[in-house]
Amino acid sequence: MTPDAPEAADSRADESLRLSGITKRFGSLVANSGIDLELRPGEIHCLLGENGAGKSTLMNILYGLLQPDEGQIVVDGVPRVFTGPRNAIDAGIGMVHQHFMLVDVFTVAENMILGREPGTLGLINLRQARRRVTELSQQYGLSVDPDARIENLPVGIQQRVEILKALANDARYLIFDEPTAVLTPQEIEELMRVMRSLRDEGKGVIFITHKLREVRAIADRITVIRRGAVAGVAGPGESEASLAEKMVGHQVSLTVSKQQHEAGDVRLRLSGVTAVAANGSVAVDDLDLEVRGGEILCIAGVQGNGQSELAAALIGTYPLRSGTIMVDGRTVDRFTTKERIDAGLGYVPEDRQHDGFVGSYSVAENLVLNSYHKPPYAQGLALRGGVIRSNARDRVAEFDIRTTSIDTEVAALSGGNQQKVVLARELSRELAVLVASQPTRGVDVGAIEFLHKRLVAERDRGTAVLIISTELDEVAALADRVAVMFRGRIVGIVGPHTSREVLGLMMAGASVEEAMASADVTTEETEGVVT
Amino acid sequence: MTRSSWWTEILTTIAAIVLALIIGAVVMVVSDPDVLDKYAYFFYRPGDALAASGDKIGSAYFALLKGAVGSWGAITQSTSQAAPLILAGLGVALAFRAGLINIGGQGQAIWGAIFAAYIGFGVHLPLVIHVLVALIAGVLGGAIWGGLVGWLKARTGAHEVIVTIMLNYVAIRMLAWLLTTPAFQRPGRTDSISPIVDWTATFARLAGSQLHVGFVLALLAAAAVWWLLERSTLGFALKAVGANPHAAATAGMSVARTTIIVMVLAGALAGLAGVDAALAPSDSGVPVPLSNGIVGDVGFDAVTVALVGRSRPVGVVLAGLLFGALHTGGLGMQGAQTPGTVTDVLQALIVLFVAAPALVTRLLPFLRRRAARSATPESTGALT
């Protein structure tokens, strides 16, 4: 058969990628159970499922990284056995990994030929590689400078290089593994455009995600996976609620019901807060902000505008250049992290694997990670294991943490349950201020609903809640006020019902007035304008 | 840690020891010319070669076993050899649990020996008090030397591996220099040797054996380290810092403070090994006087012991006993026309196999299946 058949868009029965009855077990755990999936050229097939549902296992099988225990992979009518990615690539399958497989210090062109260097006698023909980059860039509308070094490129562009790499290997079926997780809203739009153009060129695209909005925006067909098995097949017309139900297995409400907030006194006050990154660039620039008890203030913004540094500076793991931080009228910026925690500052870090918990510690241990040294968990130097364990049993029940036992290592939990452990730890203390950075990143839909409810409940207890999020859906669902951050500053504070369009413009640096004017809406919709 | 992965670790360690014994047997056969001669006509009379090999291996390992645990005297000899290994091994293991690689046991033990020995021969105190003061001084010496490493790391970010190695050299040279000064050199001697420690400062031993206070101290220290690691707030912080310093810092633990405390404690434990070297009675009943070789290679053997003991107190005790027995048994083997250094080879092989568990599981595939099964709970997190 000819791989370059011109009628690629034709969806004949024998020209397709077909997985049938795929089953994969890890010990007693069944990661995939009898999964059927078909991908035709010229379509975008969404694979929707929660974290831990088995999507990545399935794709790793398709890409030859894992071997199925049962089932068959059929490419264009020919049954195939993949013992490694090389086989999959040769069969025309390409993978855009969630964590890019690129060499940072190499250029785009060098990365493109990694693994199959063209040229003779071991000499690398870089000119040919660069020409190939340019050709493919033009064909698919993916502009990339072939001579740029990967480490200097923004994440969105790095992803393009991954896509180009797959295309350079003549991939006809492309797998995108959670590609939007690392992208800004604008970059997501751009990626969707690229995926559509790939489809129109006759490629088959598998798009793995857990975000319903994205699925509905782009999918031609949808397969929902739950607990390792196909839970349903749907078309793009399916409602978000119905998709969510298939994905989670029960009805979920996608909006958070919350009462009108009653803001109290200012509990967190930042003035002139400035933080400087290691490379000398100003990450947080003379920032002023007030959060009142009983309100949720969301900081919206494109990733990398100083939000991460601001959050870390609040808890004291990132140095302040100048400015003051006050919690309930006490100046805490000279406090150690421990003293800030004692002063009633709660913190949900952006990167929970890195900062939020100790993976090799048990659920019970992680639930007291910042209070283990105090009564009732400790008596002098001795830990009180019984109290720690009974606390864990209470928290596991209260927060519905799905774990085999309180002694299970947190690293073995799903992302959503890991986040529940972190949140349960923070919310079980008496808090004045809660700072939560990307509280639902990488968390499945069922858990998002729960986490949002708990954050609102904490607000209702009178805590000042500061949420940093790059997901506008989350901002819209939670915020009482929205502060938009751009290049280390707050460009404006607007009301919770401000349109996406206005927020988007502000996220690109426009002031409230400019954004309103361009978006052609009246300022009546906003409140508490600060520049 | 799940029960089944715990079992896998134990089995892998035992397998490593068995594999080392097998390879050690091969080494013994090829290193003995008489046995090797029989292999020259192996195809003519294979029985000769095999019988000679069997005899050789059998008698050598029998001598090893007999030398190590064959009598009450041998057993206590082994425990006295094990004591400093356990103590210094605990120092390395404790630091390792906090994510610190402590290669400085040698220097820390040397200072422990210097302080303890000096109190032992330089100061004259009543019974019991003398040995206690010498002990505390030695622990202090090791703690200071270890704490210095922690302080440098916390303050300047200096890597502990480099610092500990360099400080080992400093300690070795300091000892050599001190032994030339009037305060330390035995009067009337020109070589580097100190006076003999007072009998009031010597570790008590059970009459007619080598079972002395040092071994008891080692067991107590192991129990204390176990409590510290598993039941104390400090251990909680220490392991958290070792496993994920970022999360530890975010939870309010001070990584710098923990680092310093851990290195002080590690130094104190290694210092105790030095105290044991300086105050424990030798076969003659009198401690070995301070000399350049007073602590032997205890600081380096400690790394081995901690490695084989998987950095857990119980494991360290068992590994210390194993290597202590190998040292003692090695002497017995010399009587069986086998060089005692074969035990060094055995020790090295055991460490090699323990340090490379993948190698063992490859050689013994049934262990791999165990490992795969027990690894599954962890890997579920990566399934997404």
Image (cartoon, helix red, strand yellow):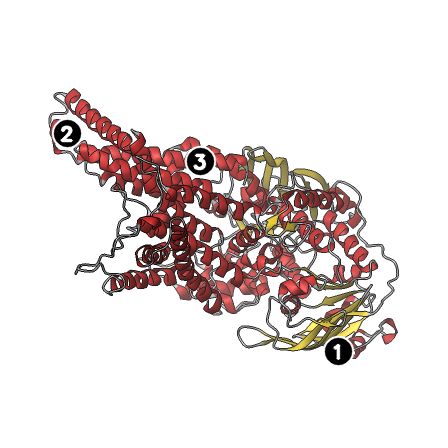
Residue A429, image x, y percentages: 73, 55
Contact between marks 1 and 3 (CB within 8 A): the answer is no
- Which mark, by number, is residue B10? 3
N-terminal of the two: label 3 or label 2? 3
> Mark 3 packing: few (<14 Cα in 10 Å), some, or many (20+)?
some
Q: Amino acid at mark 2?
A: Val
Q: CA distance from mark 3 to mark 2?
A: 35 Å
> Mark 2 packing: few (<14 Cα in 10 Å), some, or many (20+)?
many
Task: Choose between B70 and B260: the one closer to the eye.
Answer: B70
Query: Badge 2 is on which residue?
Result: B35
Residue at mark 2: chain:
B
Query: Badge 1 is on which residue?
Result: A511
Q: Secondary structure at mark 3?
A: helix
Residue at 85% of width from left, 67% of height from top?
Answer: A264
Residue A530, image x, y percentages: 79, 77
Which of discs 2 and 1 lies nearer the camera? The answer is 2
- Which mark, by number, is residue A418? none
Q: Secondary structure at mark 2?
A: helix
Location of residue A330 by image quarter = bottom right
Q: CA distance from mark 1 to mark 3?
A: 65 Å
